[in-house]
């Protein structure tokens, strides 16, 4: 199963927020006459709300079952999404209450008096304020759902950026500063595994030197700099008089693969004048 793309998830939540906003505007602007017309106008709004709630629940499940949960700050985002599932569900509940308050027309049981025009007017007058209140509540819950989706999308994007910045910083700290040309050449020459560290007597003093298989000159200062950065190690179980094998560490191999030697800025050559010299002018 491919890993969850958090950038795509954030965009999906933004799209969902726009859908909630569009539905909120539809609920606020719905025009109806109590009865069959109200059922025809409000019913689709309820179905759309249920669809958006289901989509929101899918987004919550995807994030809650992904490595995103290990990201600092993800708990707040997941809690917010969970509350949005409730808000959108309440919006659907409010729309259902509006439909329940809607007076429908139908024939009574035999023997009961049928409604007349004045009865229907009174029933509609009682129902309309109740229905309006439920519709306003639904619009409010949809507005909260839209706002929350925007917040969570922004939080995911921010969390992702912080995580990537932290990873880059960690990698930079691990890698350390760029290798100098001499350090890069030395590390490359020693990477074959045939380098050795020797100590040889000279004028009564012990002189430590590094020998490579291809004769690359490695100063003891360069070697010590590589040791300090834990890019190379020497086998101290062997005497320096016989030569200690030099090994490039895992960090050294990665540094060799990732880094390029730092180059000094190229010297700018002085422009060559094409004007005749004083001696040439004198000969003329």
Image (cartoon, rainbow, N blue to C red):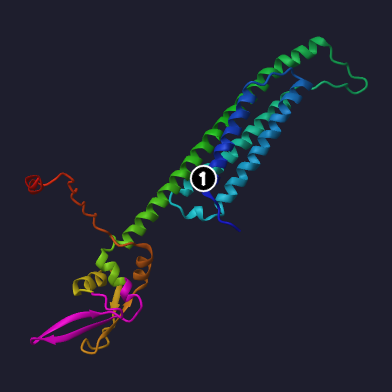
Q: Nearer the viewer, residue 86 or 151?
A: 151
Q: Which residue is mark 1?
A: 79
Q: Is residue 201 magenta?
A: yes
Q: Quadrant of the C terminus?
A: top left
* Residue 281 spot, x, y in % from top left: 9, 44
User: Residue 200's image quarter?
Assistant: bottom left
Residue 230 visible in the snapshot: no
The correct choice, above or below, for 30 with respect to 227 in the image is above
**What residue is rendered at 16% in x and 44% in y?**
275
Q: Quadrant of the N terminus?
A: bottom right
Which residue is situated farthest in the front direction here?
284
* Residue 217 spot, x, y in % from top left: 23, 75
**What residue is rendered at 61% in x and 36% in y?**
88
User: Residue 140's image quarter?
Assistant: top right
**What residue is rendered at 31% in x and 74% in y?**
189
**What residue is rendered at 75% in x and 16% in y?**
123
Q: Which segment is the magenta one?
A: 188-217
Q: Nearer the viewer, residue 21 or 171?
A: 171
Residue 220 visible in the snapshot: yes
Which residue is situated farthest in the right direction here?
110
């Amino acid at each position: 199963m491919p890993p969850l793309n958090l950038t795509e998830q954030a965009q999906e939540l933004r799209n969902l927020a726009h859908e909630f906003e569009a539905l909120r505007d539809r609920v606020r602007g719905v025009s109806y006459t109590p009865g069959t017309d109200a059922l025809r106008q409000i019913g689709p709004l309820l179905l759309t709300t249920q669809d958006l709630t289901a989509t929101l629940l899918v987004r919550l499940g995807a994030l809650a079952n992904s490595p995103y949960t290990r990201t600092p700050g993800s708990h707040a985002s997941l809690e917010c999404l969970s509350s949005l599932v409730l808000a959108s569900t309440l919006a659907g509940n409010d729309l259902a209450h509006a439909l329940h308050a809607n007076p429908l027309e139908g024939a009574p049981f035999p023997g009961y008096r049928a409604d007349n025009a004045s009865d229907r007017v009174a029933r509609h007058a009682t129902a309309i304020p109740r229905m309006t209140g439920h519709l306003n509540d639904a619009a409010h819950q949809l507005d909260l759902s839209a706002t929350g989706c925007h917040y969570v999308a922004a939080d995911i994007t921010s969390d992702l950026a912080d995580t990537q910045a932290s990873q880059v910083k960690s990698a930079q700290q691990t890698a350390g500063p760029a290798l100098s040309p001499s350090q890069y050449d030395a590390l490359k020459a020693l990477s074959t595994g045939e380098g050795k560290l020797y100590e040889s007597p000279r004028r009564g003093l012990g002189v430590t030197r590094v020998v490579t298989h291809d004769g690359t000159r490695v100063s003891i200062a360069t070697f010590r700099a590589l040791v300090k950065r834990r890019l190379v190690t020497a086998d101290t179980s062997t005497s320096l008089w016989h030569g200690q094998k030099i090994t490039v560490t895992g960090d050294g191999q990665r540094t060799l693969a990732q880094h390029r030697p730092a180059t000094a800025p190229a010297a700018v050559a002085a422009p060559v004048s094409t004007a005749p010299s004083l001696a040439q002018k004198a000969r003329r």
